Image (spheres, grey):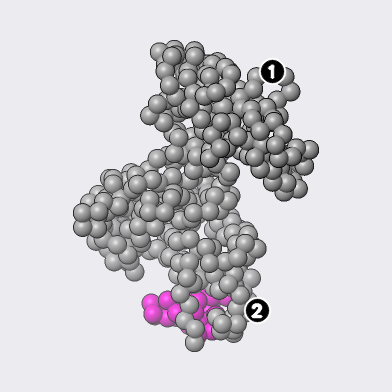
Amino acid sequence: MAAVELTDLKKSFGNVHVIKGVDLDIQQGEFVVFVGPSGCGKSTLLRLIAGLEDISSGTLKIAGDVVNEVPPSKRGIAMVFQSYALYPHMSVYNNMAFGMKLARASKEEIDQRVKAAADMLQLTQLLDRLPRQLSGGQRQRVAIGRAIVRDPQVFLFDEPLSNLDAALRVATRIEIAKLSERMADTTMIYVTHDQVEAMTLADRIVVLNGGIIEQVGSPMELYLHPDNLFVAQFIGSPAMNVVPCTIETGGDAATVRPEGGDIVHTHVGVPESSAGTKGMLGVRPENLRLADGGETIFSGPVDIVEKLGEVTLLYVNTGKPDEPVLAKLEGIANIKRGDTVRLTASPGDLHVFDDKGVAFRRRPTTH
């Protein structure tokens, strides 16, 4: 198995610069997930690693070897696509065995690997079936099995669950998580637009935007300590509420005044020199609660109430009807449309960003 190293990696299509100098080290056995908005370059970056696109400049190493000019078949990688790409006239067994047959592996080795992969992915009873006789989730497991039998150094997944319905996505995501545990020494790189997939599968998440890396870290690092406004609002669902604010005082117990609101205290490391400047105050919907005395961060009438059983979502008009503040309250809240509410949060759950969108860092905490 292998580590993957990207050094100042760039990719251009004519005058369009898609990947703009990416530096990233992926350790052997890591499960790394690329996320970002459409067009950010995450699938292109995966295709550069696979060898399906030529690298414009920079260096790509797999297991310590530079592979910029190495063809895909010689890189020791296997890729799972969202479209399954199964041969419709071949059985599950033959689909999984096809790559090894091309590599002229022995019949005994092929049989051993295919049956072992089928057992791992609960496909043993389906080996004689054709793809058209399988569900979408079963087809995707066959595509994963086809990659496993090749015994690659690196697994690449390009949005493998995007064609499945919600229930199948959950089931197949669990299968991929189990697979990662069983193949703990195998490096896996996974592209998705799905927050839940990223947060539940990844050892580390790479947040891409406009061809550059915004932040790399564990799911909880990115959720609790985003480096900037982009990461803060991209990671987490629903997205973080962000409003303009004035920084009144600095320090690790800083005070800020949200636009149209009262002064609130935050436990972030705001330099004293930032006092009197403009910034942005962020708080996640799930960190907001109804104020019972004390500080109020947001207040206003409720425009929409969504009662989902386990949670209640409140869309609160704080003066900008097109940009409501969203609160995610536990359980079934006894609140109806038109009620005026006051919302607050713990100081440690507030995020403050400077006028360039860069986060002020709080003191390290244990979670």
Give the vertical position of 43 relative to 254 (above or below).
below
Query: Which quadrant of the rendered structure holds the N terminus?
Result: bottom left
In this orientation, does residue 303 appear? Answer: yes
Q: Which residue appears farthest toward the left when viewing the image? A: 15
Per the picture, the main secondary structure of the magenta-coloured stretch is helix
Seen in the image, is 221 located left or right of residue 336? left
Question: Residue 240 in the image: x percent, y percent?
Answer: 55, 37
Ranked by sequence position, the earlier of labels 1 and 2 is 2
Question: Residue 296 in the image: x percent, y percent?
Answer: 64, 22
Q: Residue 294, which numbered label?
A: 1
Question: Residue 209 in the image: x percent, y percent?
Answer: 38, 45
Q: Residue at x 59, y 84 (%)?
A: 128
> Is residue 95 within the magenta segment?
yes
Mark 1 or mark 2, whichever is nearer to me? 1
Q: Are marks 1 and 2 in contact (CB under 8 Å)?
A: no
Q: Residue at x 41, y 29 (%)?
A: 358
Measure the alpha-carbon separation of dots 1 and 2.
Answer: 62 Å
Give the vertical position of 85 relative to 316 (above or below).
below
Residue 324's image quarter?
Answer: top right
Residue 153's image quarter?
Answer: bottom left
Nearer-the-camera pick, 167 or 124: 167
Nearer-the-camera pick, 198 or 67: 198
Q: Amino acid at mark 1?
A: Gly
Where are the magenta residues, as a range? 90-117
- Within 10 angstroms of label 1, few (less than 14), some, or many (20 or more) residues? few
**Which residue is label 2 attached to?**
125
Q: Amino acid at mark 2?
A: Gln
Where disc 1 sits, the SS reads loop
Residue 150's image quarter?
Answer: bottom left
Seen in the image, is 246 located left or right of residue 18? right
Nearer-the-camera pick, 111 or 187: 187
Give the vertical position of 296 relative to 100 (above or below).
above
